[in-house]
Amino acid sequence: MPVFKTPFNGYSVKFSPFYESRLAVATAQNFGILGNGRLHVLSLPPAPASPLTELISFDTADGIYDLAWSESHDSLLVAAVADGSVKLYDTALAPAQNPIRSLQEHTREVHSVDYNPTRRDSFITASWDDTIKLWTLDRPASIRTFKEHVYCVYSAAWNPRHTDVFASASGDCTVRIWDVREPGSTMIIPGHDFEILCCDWNKYDDCIIATASVDKSIKVWDVRSSRAPISVLNGHGYAVRKVKFSPHHRNLMVSCSYDMSVCMWDFMVEDALVGRYDHHTEFAVGVDLSVLVDGLMASTGWDELVYVWQHGNGPESTLTKGSVSCFPFFFFFVKSFCIFLMEVVRLEVKA
């Protein structure tokens, strides 16, 4: 099973939509609270037992929280940076020639970036300044700012079929559906009683969306009738950080959590938990599924590790049963304190 050790804490991992053996990882020093960041571009080895190899990396003065591959240029990456900037990198150029562009409009940390999969010339960013911004590659400034959320926007995701529609997930406990042709959001879903950290659209049904929350649950919604979720997935022990629908199977999705696990779910059956992987030893905060290879998964976490594996042949837990009762919970206490410090800083800035 290929593994890569990063110098900083992992935050996001994404497979290339052009090359089945390529992926990128966003990292941040000191758990993203303070310090530098690094964007790694990695290559899968020809033999599964060999480690991942680094093709190129780019350093930033602040942590990188998320990344997105361009859907139109195979060497282009967009990074969401903690200083409020959005940086564009061309992996065909040397690090000294990058970033090729730095967009500075958000007034707080940029937490999420998503490239439009159908129009392929635009992307959206979500920020702790409570806004989402729409960008295109040919303009030096954003096209539009979407501001209705009343707290940090943690995630924004394009609809896979409708070029002008996207969803956003916020700490105000709502998911909003937007159409860029409309003056405001077209739907508000009060999805959870606690902060919503992520959302993602089903790749086979453009009306199905999933939300992941601090309340430890994942909910699946049909936007045609959003009064109640069509499925609620419980199984994580702590906040669910990311959720991602399978690009190959309508009923499958993956998630990662502060309980240090990565889970695969079938939201259409009663016993929804299909698989659970406990290979991370600290918060698991990034997960992805390859669009080119069915069942190929990747994850990253605060343990500074990147794992890539085929579903069903996943990594074994590095912890014995006897150690589960103390070691993970010690790390949970430490990381919870780090998150508390981040919240204090954020509240002081907003005040």
Image (cartoon, rainbow, N blue to C red):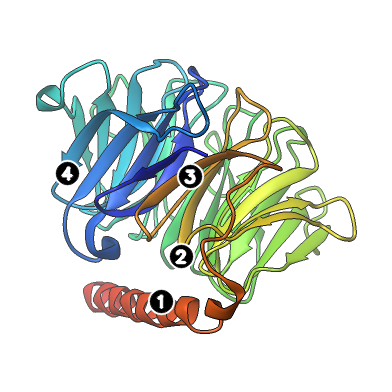
Q: Circle 4 is placed at which residue position?
A: 60
Q: Name the kind of residue labelled 4 in the image.
A: Thr
Question: Along the horizontal axis of the image, is 268 left or right of 122?
Answer: right
Residue 252 coordinates in the image, percent (x, y)? 75, 44
Dot 2 falls on a residue whose secondary structure is loop
Q: Circle 3 is placed at which residue position?
A: 307
* Residue 276 sits in quarter: bottom right
Question: Along the horizontal axis of the image, is 324 left or right of 70?
Answer: right
Q: Are marks 1 and 2 in contact (CB under 8 Å)?
A: yes
Q: Of tags 4 and 1, which is closer to the observer? A: 1
State how far apart marks 4 and 2 are (Cα). Answer: 26 Å
Q: Residues within 10 Å of mark 4 (few under 14, many from 20)?
A: some
Q: Circle 1 is placed at which residue position?
A: 331
Residue 299 coordinates in the image, percent (x, y)? 50, 47
The mark that comes first in sequence, 3 or 2, is: 2
226 vs 308: above or below: below
Q: Are marks 3 and 2 in contact (CB under 8 Å)?
A: no
Question: Along the horizontal axis of the image, is 112 left or right of 343?
Answer: right
The mark that comes first in sequence, 1 or 3, is: 3
Q: Name the kind of residue labelled 3 in the image.
A: Tyr
Q: Circle 2 is placed at which residue position?
A: 281
Q: Residues within 10 Å of mark 3 (few under 14, many from 20)?
A: many
Number of dots carrying numbers: 4
State how far apart marks 4 and 3 are (Cα). Answer: 23 Å
Question: Along the horizontal axis of the image, is 128 left or right of 88?
Answer: right
Dot 3 falls on a residue whose secondary structure is strand
Q: Name the kind of residue labelled 1 in the image.
A: Phe
Residue 224 coordinates in the image, percent (x, y)? 81, 48
The mark that comes first in sequence, 4 or 1, is: 4
Q: Of tags 4 and 3, which is closer to the observer? A: 3
Dot 1 falls on a residue whose secondary structure is helix
Q: Name the kind of residue labelled 2 in the image.
A: Thr
